[in-house]
Amino acid sequence: MSHPDLSVVVPIYEEELNLPKLHERLSATLKAMGLSYELWFVNDGSKDGSASVLRQLAAKDPNTFFLLFSRNFGHQIAVMAGLENARGKAVVIMDGDLQDPPELIPELYAKYKEGHEVVYARRRSREGESWFKKATAKLFYRLLKKLTEIDIPLDTGDFRLIDQKVVAYLKEMPEQSKFLRGQIAWMGFRSAEVLFDRDSRIHGKSHYPLKKMLRFALDGITGFSDKPLLWVSRLGLSISAISGGLILYALLAHFIWERTITGWTSLMITLTFLGGVQLLAIGVIGQYLSRMHRNLQGRPLYVVQSAHLPEAKENFTGN
Ligand code: UDP
Ligand code: MG
C-alpha cells in the first residue's frame, strides 16, 4: 500500500482525552468508505499523555502512524510534518479536538472525486467559541482579502481535503513561517466547499490564545502582502509634506513676521508623533526582516524525537 486512497493528517497538542474517540470515529468513517487509508498523527510536544495514547493506538491499528516532535513547534508546522509523510492520493487535514467532525470526510471526498483539487470544509456555525474569537477571525480574513491578491475563503480553517498534487507544491514552498491556508489558496487549484457545523471542543482548551492568533495573522500578512511596507512609505511621504509646510511657517514666523512661538505644546506633539510614526515604520520593516532572517537561517522546520513510520526500517529508535 504505497499510495493509499486517503491520508488523514492530524496535529496533536495535548489531546490525550480526545484521541481515542477521534481515532475511533475516523476509523469507522474511513472503513465505511471502503477505501485504503492511513492516519498520521503529529504530536507537537504535548506535555500530557498524548504520545503514549498514540503508541497504544498504533500498536493496535496498522493504518496509524505518528511523529513525536521533540518540543512544541506549532500547529502549522505539525500539519506540514504530517503532509511530508502522507502518501495518500488525497490528504485530509483536520484538528485533533473533534471540532472538525470526521464524518464530513465522505462529503469532502465526493467533491474531490468530482474533480476538485482542494475541498474546503466551511463552517456554517461555530459552537462554543467566544464572540471575540469569531469577530477577530472575521475581521482578519476580510483584512487579508484587502491586503492580498489571493482569495482565502471566509470561515474556513485548515480542515480540508487536498490532492497529493497540492501537497507536492506545499513541499516546494520553503518558507519557515507557514500559513497553509494562504499557500494553498495562492496555488489557485480548482476548489469546492462543503458546509458543516463546527462543534465545540470535547476535552481540553484552545491552544490558540490571542498572542498566537496575532502571530499567525502576522505570518499571513507578511507572507502574502507587501502593502504594509507601501503604507509606511506613503505615511512617511505625507508626513514629510506636512513638515515641509511647518518648516516654511516656522522660518516665516521667525525671520519675516518676527513672531517667535513659545510653543512647548506644539513641540511635544510633533516630537511624540514623529517618534511614534518612526517606530511604527521600523516595526513594520522589522516584521519582514524577521521573516527573511528565519528563511535565511534555513533551519529544519521541526525536530522528530521518535516516530512510527510505515516501513519498519525507517523507524526511528528512541523511546
Ligand atoms: N495544535 C498543535 N500545536 C499547537 C497548538 C495546537 O498541534 O501548538 C493542534 C491541536 O491539538 C488541535 C489543532 O492544532 O488539533 C487546533 O488547535 P486548537 O483546537 O487549540 O485551536 P482552535 O480550534 O481553538 O483554533
Ligand atoms: Mg480547536
Image (cartoon, rainbow, N blue to C red):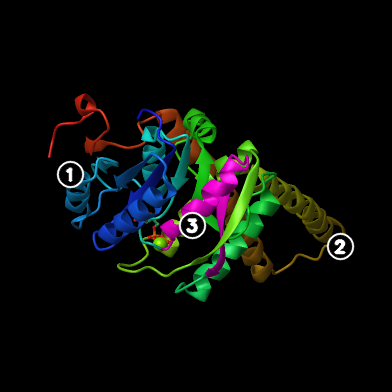
Quadrant holding the C terminus: top left
Magenta run includes residue 102: yes
Going from N to C along the chain, the mark reached first, 3 or 2, is 3
**Cα–Cα gap, marks 1 and 2:** 90 Å
**Residue carrying label 1:** 59
Q: Residue at x 65, y 59 (%)?
A: 142
Q: Nearer the viewer, mark 3 or mark 2?
A: 3
Q: Residue at x 63, y 61 (%)?
A: 273
Locate residue 202, reporting x and y percent.
34, 69
Element marked by disc 1? helix
Residue type at mark 2? Trp
Does 300 sit above or below residue 106? above
Q: Are marks 3 and 1 in contact (CB under 8 Å)?
A: no
Residue type at mark 3? Leu
Element marked by disc 2? loop
Going from N to C along the chain, the mark reached first, 3 or 1, is 1
Q: Are marks 3 and 2 in contact (CB under 8 Å)?
A: no
Magenta-drawn segment: 99-125
Locate residue 105, reporting x and y percent.
47, 52
**Residue carrying label 2:** 257
Residue type at mark 1? Ala
